[in-house]
Structure formats: C-alpha cells, structure tokens
Amino acid sequence: MRSSKAGLSRIAVLLSVLVAAQSYGAVSLDRTRVIFEGGQKSVSLVVSNDNKQLPYLAQGWIEDSQGKKIQQPLTALPPVQRIEPGSKSQVKIETLPSVGALPQDRETLFYFNLREIPPRSERPNTLQLALQTKVKLFYRPQALVPKRNAVPFQEQLTLTRAGDRYQVNNPTPYFVTLIDGRNAARNSAINDFKPLMIAPKSKGVLEVSAEALGSRPLLTYINDYGARPQLQFTCSGDHCKATAVRPAG
C-alpha cells in the first residue's frame, strides 16, 4: 500500500511539473485589444511563436459579446496556420457585407480568440495544454474615429454617488474599461477594486465603497493602445467630474 501511494505521489509531482512547463504560452499576440475602425476592410494582427525549437499551430476565431462563435460580420483568416519556431505570422480580421448592419452611433463589442496547438509529444506520460488568448475586439464606426490629438473621450465620464457606491456614467458612444481605483486625497490604492467595463451610453456601479475612494477618486482605464492613463475626479456633493488626465505610469 505504501509503495502504491508513493508511486501515485511521484506521478502527481511529475504531472505538476509537466503542467507548469507547458503552462507558458508559446504563441503570443502583439496587442491586448483590437480596434477595428469603420471604413477599413481588414486589420492585421501579428502572431509570434516564441518557442525556439518547436512549430505550433495557431487557431483564431471571433465571438460576439455573449461569447458565441460567429462567422460574420467579422471573420478571422486563416482560421488555422502553422508557425515555425521563433517565427512570426499574421491573422487578418476582415469584414463581410453584413458589417453594414452594425450600429453606426456606437461601438460594438466582439472577442478575438487565439489558441495555440502544440506538436504531439513523443514522450509518454506528457500532459499537453492548448493555451488560449482572448482579447476584446471593438468595431468602431467610421464616424466615431477620433481625430488626431483629440481629447480622450474617457474625460467625459462622470460619477454619481448613490449610498455607499459610485455610479459611473458613460455618455460616450465608446466602451470604457476601468481597471483600478485610488483615493487621490490619501494616495492609497483600493485593494479590492473590481474591473468594470461600461457600455456606450450606459451606466455601471463600482463594486467598492464610495468612502474608500473619497471625494477625489482616481480611476485607471485602458486606452486604445493598451496603456493605462488615470482620470482624476473632483466631487461636489454627490456628483463628480473628471478634471485631469494623468499619463500612464
């Protein structure tokens, strides 16, 4: 019995090591979000195989905002491709004629998925994992493409205090993702801050106490390039306006 338990223990340790070894993704994407601007026929994403010894397959597809796999109005090509060791390739996200049916007064949310498929191992008792990357894909109508040097649309966000929570008001036609909150007056981070994505022309509630954020909330958002600028709010009564934008740090 002891021998059997020792054997199972060794197998468990071996599997743990193999899982850890395989859990580092070989196939990577060149961005953390995709902005597809209306008027473009396609957007190219760079896919890299960071493994220097083995080729990998890369499988790409698109989902709607509910996580359902779709083939239109956007599609990813090629759906599957082989990437040689240490090499780069591209995935193109292309529009189909049905893209014209998307709302033109606000962004539409999709998700781009990229799954790596490792080569079959010749070693026995090897556990292989097909790791997957999922990033937000925003279709932005041509009329909403910001002009160069335009004021960040995130500055239009306002906060309204309701009880012990702040409601975030997004009057813009864009999605806004908040990932961090601080009390600027105390210069203290909020440890239990939960990221929040607010849809265009809608509202969302921050799942952290208004008391913790104080009367000078400092919220961090993700911009089009994956950077993380901060919005400084100043409150008067129950209403707060963004008064300054700090660069990403």
Image: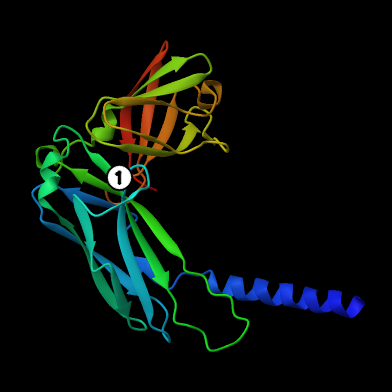
Q: Is residue 51 above or below residue 178?
A: below
Query: Residue 70: x and y, percent?
Result: 28, 52
Instruction: Tell me if 152 is positioned left or right of 69 in this view.
Output: left
Percent of width and height locating residue 125: 63, 82
Q: Mark 1 packing: few (<14 Cα in 10 Å), some, or many (20+)? A: some
Q: Residue at x 34, y 55 (%)?
A: 32
Residue at the location (66% across, 74% down)? Answer: 15
Which residue position holds label 1?
Answer: 223
Residue in the foreground of this view, choosing between 157 and 186: 157
Residue in view at x 40 percent, y 60 percent? 133
Look at 88% across and 80% down and name the residue there.
Answer: 3
Instruction: Give percent across and percent down for residue 71.
Output: 24, 55
User: Is residue 135 rendered to the left or right of residue 42?
Assistant: right
Q: Is residue 215 visible?
A: no
Under circle 1, the secondary element is loop
Q: Amino acid at mark 1?
A: Asn
Q: Which residue of the protein is positioned furthest toward the bottom in this rendering?
A: 122
